[in-house]
Image (cartoon, rainbow, N blue to C red):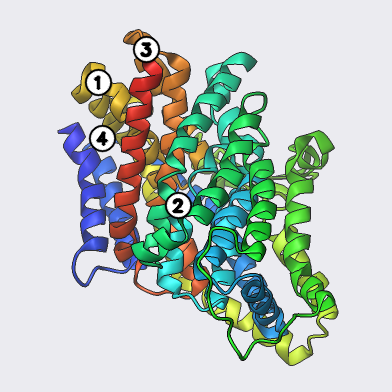
Amino acid sequence: MPLFFSIAPIVLLIWMMTKRNGIPSFIALPLTAIIVYFIQLLWFDSQPVLLHANIITALISVFTPITIILGAILLNKLMQISGAEDVIRNWLENISPNPVAQLMIIGWAFAFMIEGASGFGTPAAIAAPILVGLGFNPLRVALLALVMNSVPVSFGAVGTPTWFGFANLGLQEDNLLEIGRLSALIHFVAGFVIPLLALRFIVSWQEIRQNSLFIILSILSCTVPYLLLAQINYEFPALVGGAIGLAISVVLARMGIGIKRYERRHDLPQIVPFNKVIKAMIPTLLLIGILIITRIHQLGIKAWLNNAEINWQLHLGWLGDLSVSKSLVINLQQVLGTSASASYKTLYVPAIIPFLLVVLMCIPLFQLNRYQVQRMFCETGSRIFKPFIALFGALVMVNMMMLGDENAPVIIIGKALAAMTGESWLLFSSFLGALGSFFSGSNTVSNLTFGGIQHSIALNNGMNVNLMLALQSVGGAMGNMVCLNNIIAVCSILGITNAEGQIMKKTILPMLVYGGIAAVMALILAS
C-alpha cells in the first residue's frame, strides 16, 4: 500500500497529460499536488504544518526556473525586435542551407557548449529560439532540444551534477574522477544514437542518411574531446567539448564536408556583412562569456555570487527567519517553525546575470526606442502566468513526494524498484536517476536524492560503487528529456501551449533507448 499511494499520483499525472485531449500542465500539476497533499496527510500521517511549510518553500523555489524562463523570453524578444535574429538566420543559411547542418551546429554543438557553461535549462532557452528563427517548427524544435541536451548534462554547469551531486557521500577525489570517466564513456556511446533520434523529430531518415558523415563528424567533434578530458577532469568536459565541436562543425558545414548540397535561397543576400553578423551575435556572445566567467570557480566570481555570509536578517514571526547574504542570496529558514527552508540565489541564477544584464546592455546597442522596449517587456510578461502555475504545482508535488525521510514516497519508489530487480539492478539503476530528474528537473538534485540509495545497493550487493554512481548520473541526464520543468520551460520560451503531454509521450522513447544503452554498457563495464 505505501508503494501504491507513492506511485499512484505519478501514474495519474502522466495519464492526464498524455491522454487524448490531455489536460494542460497548469491544471494537471496543481491537481496532482493537491492529491499528493491529501495522501501525505491521510495515509503517511505527515504533520499539516510541515506540508504547509513545504508549499511556502515551493513558492520561493519556483522563482529559480520562472526567472530563467523570463530572462530567456526577454532575450528572445530582443533578438526578434532588433532584427538580430534575421541576421543570424541569414548568416547560418549562408554557412549552409542544409537543415541538418543547421540543426547539428545549433541544436547539438552550440547547446552542448552552453550546457557545459550553465545548466539550468539554459541550452534550450538559447538554442531553441534560434532554430525556430531559422524556420523550423516550434514543437519539433522543442522535442529536438530536449533530447539533444542529454549527453553533456552530467558535466553541465561546470560539472556540478558530479562534484556537487555526490558531495554528501564523502567520496574521495579519485572516486569522483572515476565516476566522471565512466559517465563520459556511457554518454560517448549513447552519443552515436541519441542525436539521430533527436534529428528524426524534424528531418526524415533519408535526409539523415544523406548527411550521415557530417552528423557523425559533428557528434565526434564534441564527444571525443569530452571523453578525453573526462579522464583527468570532471568540470570542463562538456564546456570544452562543446566549444571544440562547435568550431569544427561550422568549418565542416562551410566546406560542405559530408552534407548533401542544397540550392541556396535566392532571396538571401550573397554575403552577410561580417560587422552585421558580429553585432547580431553580441547578445549571444556576451551571454556565453558571462556564463563561463561566472561558472568557473577557479576565477573566484562563482564563489562571490554564492557567498552565503549573512548581510542582514529579519525574524518574520510564525512564517520563519528571512536572511539576505552579501551576494543577495535570499534565505527563508525554519518556515512555520519546521526544518523546511528555501533560497533564491539572486545573482547566480542565470536570470538577472546574464539574461537581464545582457538585454539592458544591448538596448542602446540596437538603438531600440521606448515603444520597442515597452513591447519587449510586455510581451514577455504576458507569457509567464501559466508556466508559473504549472511550475509551482510541480514543485509543490516534488516537495510533498520527498517528505518523510526514509518513508518518503520518492524513496519508497526507489527502494521498491531495487527490490524488484534484485541482482539485476545494474541494468535498471539509470532509470532511478531518470526518475529523480523527472521529479526535480535537475541531474544534480537527482544525484543528491538517489546517490545514497545507489551507493547502499552497490555495497550491499558487492557491485562496483563507482559504476553504480556513474549510471545514476547518466540516468539523471537522460531524465532531462521527460522532466516536466524542462518541458514547461522550453514550451514557454517558444510560445507552445497545451503540448506538454504530447511532448512527454514522444521523448520517453529516446529516454528508454538511452537507458538500454546504459544497461548494455553497465554489463560490459562490470565484466
Whether residues under marks 1 and 2 lie with C-beta atoms below 8 angstroms apart, the answer is no
Three-letter amino acid code of the residue under disc 2: Pro
Number of the label disc, if any, that sits on residue 44? 4
Residue 452 visible at all: no
Location of residue 101 in the rendering, given as x and y in whole percent from the top left corner: 55, 64
Residue that mark 2 sits on:
195
How far separated are the C-alphas under marks 4 and 1?
A: 30 Å
**Mark in front: 2 vs 4:** 2
Q: Which residue is mark 3?
A: 463
Q: Please give left or right for residue 51 compared with residue 34 in the image.
A: right
Three-letter code, disc 3? Met
Q: Given contact means CB atoms under 8 Å apart, are the residues at marks 3 and 4 in contact?
A: no
Q: Residues within 10 Å of mark 1 (few under 14, many from 20)?
A: few
Residue 75 in the image: state x and y as whole percent. 67, 71
What is the secondary structure assignment of the residue under circle 2?
A: helix
Q: Earlier in the sequence, mark 1 or mark 2?
A: 2
Instruction: Check contact, mark 1 vs mark 3: CB within 8 A.
Output: no
Q: Residue furthest left?
A: 1
N-terminal-most mark, 3 or 4: 4
- Give the x, y percent position of residue 358: 77, 66
- Which residue is labeled 1 in the image? 424
Q: Earlier in the sequence, mark 2 or mark 4?
A: 4
